[in-house]
Image (tube, helix red, strand yellow):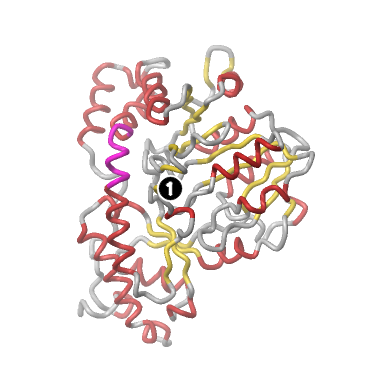
Amino acid sequence: MSSELPALLGGTPTRPDGPPAWPLPDPDVQAAVARAMASGAWGQYHGEHVCALEEELAAFHDVPHALACASGTLAVEAALRALRVGAGDEVVMAAYDYESNFLTLHALGAKPVLLDVHAHNWQLDETKLEAAITPLTKAVICSHLHGGLVHMRAVMEIARRYNVGVVEDAAQAPGATVDGKPAGTWGDVGTLSFGGSKLLTAGRGGALLFTDAQFHQRAKTWLHRGLQQWAPLSELQAAALRPQLRKLSAATAHRATRATTLLTALQPTPGLSPLGAPFSVRSEGASAYYKLGFQYDPRAFGLSRELFVKALRAEGIAFDVGFKALHVGRSPSRFRALGELAHATDAHDNCVMLHHPVLSGATSDVQQVADAVAKVYRYRDELTRPA
């Protein structure tokens, strides 16, 4: 087989073994888990690792309180409950966001108010936030997605003016810096996810970050049934997370270097633009590069988005389509929309994402991504012809 032809046309894949597996092998994680097994901590209700992880998360993010729990989705619900969001309240969020955040609002009896996103980076458009606030508004959810960053300083200024709470969901951005502060520390409550694909992973799990002791106490009380937390992070999960947290800053810097190399190599590619300018590339913001997002223009590239993703996956490159926008395919009775949500619709139709593990590798790994994209582009006409 020819290495020049795309794999879909019978050529050799750029990465014959496929994309890197995640999580990457880590001897420090393996040693920490082995020590927890040997000590018996892995089977304890109340051991050293969960408490230590909470202290280390608080120290890393420079906040007084952190609270671990069973998932990032649960963390968002606990954060909303700490802000006393309930039935009949309205909560503003981006129309392009993680579906579970939308469904969590319905579980609480609250109504999502969907705001459009910026055209340049598909993050919540803070310039439209003030117009979305009514006397029923109780909170705002801000999610940093696909390598982009929400302009949190501006969000907080508006929220404070109207006495509205803010949940900053940093599930895709642990280790990122937003306007000079760690992601997750601008909001009244910050949330983290430790799901299987995340930059900090324990397969499952989540955490909350607090600067306000009262919000911390409310969330902690809700997550407990008497003495027992009913949806905890396990000691074994916490043991696996602690060495990852210690390496997070170095890992973030490494991914940033590789992302810069990749984006430079991809610059000549028509129809493939990284999410970014202006805010997420300003000096105040430094991304964590989880699921590196791109705006994909099928007309400029010459392939449908679905065929682009299929062709790159055949090359061993882990591209996926983005999220489904929250207003698409849902009854208007389930939300209130501010305006036409045109940019969120664009994100729904045209977002593609590169899975992050390749950014943790060598320069040659990200060059393979660029080479595979270039190969697919060269043969775009052949790829669209009927077999």
At x 48%, y 41%, the residue is 170
Above or below 19: residue 212: above
Q: Residues within 10 Å of mark 1 (few under 14, many from 20)?
A: many
Q: Position of residue 164 (x, y in %)?
A: 68, 36
Please state if 18 lies on the left or on the right of 141 as rendered.
left
Vertical comparison of 147 with 69: above or below: below
The structure residue drawn at horizontal position 38% and vertical position 16%, both measured from the top left corner, is: 44
Quarter of the image with the N terminus in it: bottom left
Seen in the picture, residue 42 relative to 117 is either above or below; the reply is above
Q: Determine whether, in the image, residue 215 is placed left or right of residue 372.
A: right
- Side of 281 relative to 89 (left or right): left
Q: Residue 332: where, in percent of width, then height? A: 75, 56
Mark 1 is on which residue type?
Gly
Q: Is residue 194 magenta?
A: no
Q: Which residues are magenta?
A: 245-253
Residue under the image location 26 percent in, 16 percent down: 39
In the displayed structure, 83 sits above or below 262; it is: above
Where residue 345 appears, x then y in whole percent? 61, 64
Q: Which residue is mark 1?
A: 285
The part of the image, by quadrant, that contains residue 381 is bottom left
Q: State the residue in front, 383 or 112.
A: 112
Quadrant in which residue 43 is drawn? top left
Q: Quadrant for residue 307, please give it.
A: bottom left
- Residue found at x 29% / y 58%: 19
The secondary structure making up most of the magenta span is helix
Give the tally of numbered discs. Answer: 1
Q: Nearer the viewer, residue 10 or 76?
A: 76
Mark 1: secondary structure: strand
Residue 89: x percent and y percent? 75, 37
Q: In the image, is residue 248 part of the stretch drawn in magenta?
A: yes
